[in-house]
Image: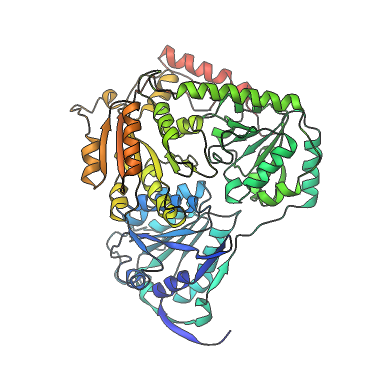
Amino acid sequence: MTDATIRLTTAQAIIRYLDNQFIDVDGEELRVCGGGFGIFGHGNVTCLGEALYDVQDTLPLYRGQNETGMGFAAAGYAKAWLRQRFMFCTASAGPGTANLLTAAGLAHANRLPLLMLCGDTFLTRLPDPVLQQMENFNDPTFGVNDAFKPVTRYWDRITHPAQIIQSLPNALATMLDPADCGPAFIGLPQDVQGWAYDYPQAFFEKRVHRVRRQAPDKDEVADALALISTAKRPVIIAGGGVQYSGAVSELTAFAESTGIPVVETIAGRANMTSDHPLNCGPLGVTGSDSANAIAEQADVIIAVGTRLQDFTTGSWTAFAKDAKIIGINVGRHDAMKHMSLPVVGDAAVCLAAMMGTYKAPAKWTTFAQDARAKWDRYVAENVKPGNRPNSYAQAIGVVNDLCSPRDRIVAAAGGLPAEVTANWRTRDIGTVDVEFGFSCMGYEIAGAWGARIAQSQREPDNDTITFCGDGSYLMLNSDIYSSVLTDKKLIVLLLDNGGFAVINKLQNNTGNESFNNLIKDTPTATAQFTVDFEAHAASMGAIAETVANPAELGAAFKRAKAADKTTVIVMKVDPYEGWTSEGHAWWEVGTPEVSQSPKVRAAHKDVESTRSKQRKGV
């Protein structure tokens, strides 16, 4: 290391540092930052924009249409790269930055790396109050950017150019840490962005990073093996962390050597292909009868790489109260949930260390496989065209049959995550992205755009296919335009059920009357009309067509596969009769204890009657 320095602005130094950070991915050195998404305003265009201009070839900047969508796209990119690479998002001060809050929440809930480089008010305060500044009368240091503290894993405001020498490596370390992975936020006051400093040249030298693989404590492994040895009805819950740790092979080997059935979380879909004899289906509220029946009877639960969210646990009613849980997780917080016996470490290393001589009783393994076979028969009938009015499940079945094994499937929020989770038959490993950690409407198209950017770098011959309801489409659709502008082809299945139909279903199932969810049940919607989604998508440059039924959908999907740019296929689905009726676990929602409606009172009594099955954390 030498004493040589180079004089740069804060913004220039940030970009130069990012441009020289690499990661080893399966023996190949790639930039850990794949580029960024940006919308320029007065808070970031003059300094950060100036710095980004010179690195267009190595850190490409994708122009966003909406800051929330930019964050979703960055999340989709990070998921597709299994958290080994990330994108940054840059927004101006004020509302542009505030629009990233939802995306930060999504990244935080899903443990995804996302770097936000956002403008801030002037450090000197000489021009205060400035355009878009949120004044706090009691604390002038407190502003909009402070709102990101609860939804980020790392937060900093740069008040001197030298601070990035400490801040940037810490932000990067957080985003690449398997246990602490999540979004990082760096606030950049507009004057500080342009201030110059003599940075040490060594700070910008090329560095190759690796994602840490933490070995488990041998005593924790021994305790877990001892508990497994007592199991008569064990089950493995495979979460999203299995893929992030690259532990699919180890999971499969462990399951095959022990004969323990595997059930998948929503984030863990596509840990195994659907035809693997030990893959016993998705678990929980939006799961399968097979997985839920297995979980209900299990005496030892081996939870691998999952945060045990309520949709997985059925609000903690899916398991027997006396079942013992082993939590295999790189994050201590997740490994110890509900008094689990923790094995803290990388999933691949932990599973390899736990290989032994245990064999699950053949009767139990057979029971699990028979339950899965029965569920497969239900799904085959459920997705069959013509079995009822047009449904999500039918559309999923059509696409499932016609897509390529390595096509990437994206869904989020509303009813589609449930329908995809329950009905999708995985054809290849790591090909499903159901965003249900933060359950963000609007992720479907933006997240798919980010996933497609990643896919074009890894598997350009495959497609990114996203299932989107009309409610989500109306909420955030502008990245159809982004995908066309950037030549990142998507196939968008826009399934129109006339509003927020899944919440209408929940409303009705809890005794309430339909109100303000379906457009037709919205009293203030006095001038009702049908949106021409085909024309709207076409106006953004996409190929678009409307189909009447699943048969026409299949033909349109074949055309979309053959096309060279984004295609949107619109089909109406029934808001009432089209739902998957099996495979559900109890889910706790607040219901009125007192109501004038007999139906609401009855529904409350029915919900509470199942609470007796709920584990209380022990």
Determine whether 481 is above or below 549 in the image.
Answer: below
Q: Is residue 1 left or right of residue 556?
A: right
Left or right: 190 with respect to 605?
Answer: left
From this view, report whether residue 380 is shown above or below residue 126.
above
Q: Is there any visible trace of residue 52 in the rendered image?
A: yes
Return the x and y of residue 170 as percentages of the image width and height. Answer: 55, 65
Q: Do we see residue 147 in this rendering?
A: no
Where is 263 relative to 32, above or below?
above
Q: Position of residue 311 (x, y in %)?
A: 54, 33
Rendered-image quadrant of the N terminus: bottom right
Q: How many marks?
A: 0
Image coordinates of residue 264 in percent, x first then y, are 59, 36
The structure residue drawn at horizontal position 68% and vertical position 26%, both measured from the top left corner, is 320
**Image quarter of residue 375:** top right
Q: In the current view of this chain or complex, which residue is farthest to the left?
A: 527
Between residues 192 and 561, which one lies in front from this camera angle?
561
At x 62% / y 26%, what residue is drawn?
614
Image-based side of 400 in relation to 586, left or right: left
Please tell me which residue is depicted at 39% across the width and 40% down the height of the picture: 466
Nearest the viewer among 352 and 275 is 275
Q: Is residue 318 left or right of residue 366?
A: left
Quadrant that contains the C terminus? top right
Q: Which of the 4 image quadrants contains residue 123?
A: bottom left
- Residue 83 against residue 532 in the figure, above or below: below
Q: What scheme was used to colour the molecule? A: rainbow
Q: Quadrant of residue 297?
A: top right
Near-viewer residue (33 or 460): 460
| Pick the front one: 331 or 190 | 331
Residue 521 on image: x %, y %: 29, 23
Q: Residue furthest bottom?
A: 3
